[in-house]
Amino acid sequence: MDNKVYAYIRVSSKDQNEGRQLEEMRKLGIPEERIFIDKQSGKDFNRAEYQTLKRMLKDSPGSLLIILSIDRLGRNYKEIMKEWQELTTECKADIKVLDMPLLDTTQYKDLLGTFISDLILQVLSFVAEQERNNIKKRQEQGIALAKAENKHLGRPRAEITEEYIKEYTKWKNGEITATQAMVNSNTKRNTFYKLAKIMEVKIA
């Protein structure tokens, strides 16, 4: 039985920094080749590095998996419970959650210990999922509020500037070509003609 120690790190996007989690794992002396990092949402477990780690744990029964916090494993309550069971039973791995000492299967092997660990896991998993749902709800509310206030989301709308009016007028008078007007007003083709239609309505 090869009792190896592995670490799993997850951040929600490529823009987020995994440095804090990585530093914690390095302090524990875990080799770099046994530290697996995913930069992906925690809504499910279809993550390349996690799946590779899981296969390695199956090949090394009795190994220990370390994560910083339960939400780094995932944010879906039912999925976390399912994965925890698979890791501890099918992969025969121990799991240690650094910021929650009671979630340490190496320490609590008796019936009461297992019961407490399972109970805490259920509560923390539920909280993690609720947090995810609340974030999604706040995003939806923000979008709805922006629409209600008639705010434009995404790319900023092109505006009719004094420079555009000047070049548009030259173009309409036949003094310059449309291409020259676009260049002079620093306006893209589609935007130029879209604004031209607005100008025509205003002039009419």
Image (cartoon, rainbow, N blue to C red):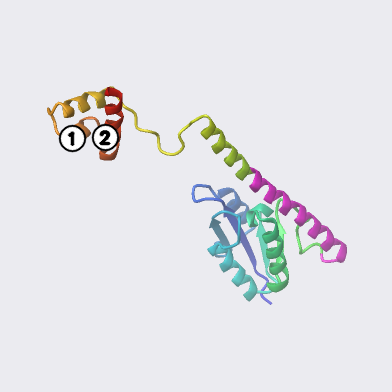
User: In the rendered image, which quarter is residue 200 located in?
Assistant: top left
8 with respect to 199 (left or right): right
Q: Is residue 146 above or below residue 102?
A: above
Query: The residue tagged with tag 1: helix, strand or loop?
Result: helix
Where residue 133 appears, x then y in whole percent? 65, 47
Identify the residue at horizontal 55%, vertical 58% (top origin).
Answer: 37
Query: The residue tagged with tag 2: helix, strand or loop?
Result: helix
Tally of numbered tags: 2
Magenta segment boundaries in residue numbering: 109-134
| Marker disc for residue 121 | none
202 with respect to 87 (left or right): left
The quarter of the rendered structure image containing the N terminus is bottom right
Is 123 a magenta residue?
yes
Front residue (pair 2, 52) = 52
Dots 2, 1 in contact, CB < 8 A: yes
Identify the residue at horizontal 59%, vertical 56% (top origin).
Answer: 9
Identify the residue at horizontal 60%, vertical 45% (top origin).
Answer: 136
Q: Which residue is mark 2?
A: 192
Q: Amino acid at mark 1?
A: Ala
Where residue 93 appears, x then y in whole percent? 70, 69
Q: Which residue is mark 1?
A: 178
Front residue (pair 200, 140) = 200
Where residue 5 appears, x then y in whole percent? 65, 65
Q: Is residue 188 above or below residue 41?
A: above
Q: Amino acid at mark 2?
A: Phe
The quarter of the rendered structure image containing the C terminus is top left
Identify the residue at horizontal 63%, vertical 64% (top origin).
Answer: 6
Residue sitting farthest toward the front: 204
